[in-house]
Amino acid sequence: MTKPQASETVATAADGNKSSYEKWVEGEGIPVIRTFFVEDIRHVKLEGWERKGGNGAFLQMEGAGQVNNCYICEIAPGKSLKPQRQLFEETIYIISGRGATTVWNHEQRKQTFEWQAGSLFSPPLNTWHQLFNGSGSEPARYLAVTTAPTMINLLHNLDFIFHNDFAFADRFDARQNYFNGEGTLYAGDLKGFKFIGNVWETNFVPDARSFKLLDYNERGAGGSNIKFELSENTTACHISEFPVGTYKKAHRHGAGAHVIILGGEGYSLIWPDGAPIKKYEWHEGSMVVPPENWWHQHFNAGAKPARYLALRAFGSKKYQGVRPRYQGAVDRKKGGAQIEYADEEPVVRQWFEEALTRLGLQSQMAKHYETIA
Ligand SMILES: [Fe+2]
């Protein structure tokens, strides 16, 4: 390894009250929003961020549990961010605007790909990467979910995290088609990996809002989904969509699932075991991060399909073992972490019927209730 190019001056040793990661966040000097529900990521107020050379804010979601984190960054019209590299995984979703990213391990082998609102990608671990705004008149805004908390708390050495020259050739081989959007669909048990249906391995998703999904009924009510494996990451993400007049089954799992509404209108019920159920209404641009082991359930209460993107903590099907597997699509009566329709509280159906009635919509749940009964 070569000598670090610069030295981080912010100490990150934990002080007994704050973790190394929390101390790093404070030192970045941008707004920190602490909640588990953001009504609209398109309008979160940002401030100048020296590290990036743009404007930013941390969304330090209570439901992330310092497993992963989230930030929003905006590139001014006609500008670019500073080149970055870091020893944690980062998945980027483009909220608005258009532009390009250049990725490299070696100066002579740079490659550039273009993106637009809705694009999804991940600069491979510890590669240099730089984001450019492709418009001279509009800002470009993105949201990123990263494993920074896990890595900074574990290593508590910012030089190693941000100024490490190791090139992960197994993650990024600099082939020229790396980010061209091609991929492989996996279902079942292939290549010795236990894939569980609807897995699309790729390094670039042009538009998550319109990406074609595949049937997925385990989580209820005629839903469809696709799970992504990006850039040989141990983290994972997926898109889920559910039809008009339906809702998904309640379930719970570990911390760090950042659920971003890509389209449609509705609400989520979120509650810790034994506590009152609370309702959070959402629309395109809303984000919810259910705290660890809290029950949560998503309802389509609008006139078109509801679609979300979930950027999660670890959970790759290809690289397992980082986090314990949860059974979020298995009946809790069978040891899983999902509440079947037949077992839900009466108020759940009552609120849904009331929401649809107000909008003049019909519930499509009867056949799904019967299937389970
Ligand atoms: Fe969930």
Image (cartoon, helix red, strand yellow):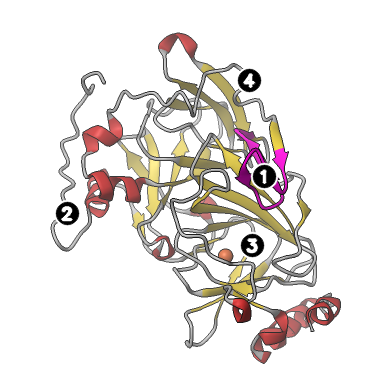
Front-lying residue, 90 or 168: 168
Which residue, as the protein is rendered here, is positioned at the far front? 192
Q: Label 4 sits on what residue type?
A: Asn
Characterize the local packing of mark 3: few (<14), some (14-19) or many (20 or more) Cα atoms within 10 angstroms: many
Q: Label 3 sits on what residue type?
A: His
- Position of residue 48 in the picture relative to residue 321 (left or right): left
- Label 3 SS: loop
For mark 4, what is the residue? 177
The CB of the residue at mark 1 lies under 8 Å from ligand 1? no
For mark 2, what is the residue? 14
- Label 4 SS: loop
Q: Which mark is residue 340?
A: none
Highlighted range, magenta: 185-204
Against 301, is 200 above or below?
Answer: above
For mark 1, what is the residue? 208
CA separation in Å, label 3 and label 1: 16 Å
Estimate the x, y position of residue 336 in percent, counting from the top left. 58, 73
For mark 3, what is the residue? 283
Does label 3 or label 2 sit earlier along the sequence?
A: 2
Can you tell which of label 4 and label 3 is closer to the viewer? 4
Does label 4 or label 3 sit earlier along the sequence?
A: 4
Residue at the image position 64 percent from the left and 67 percent from the top: 329
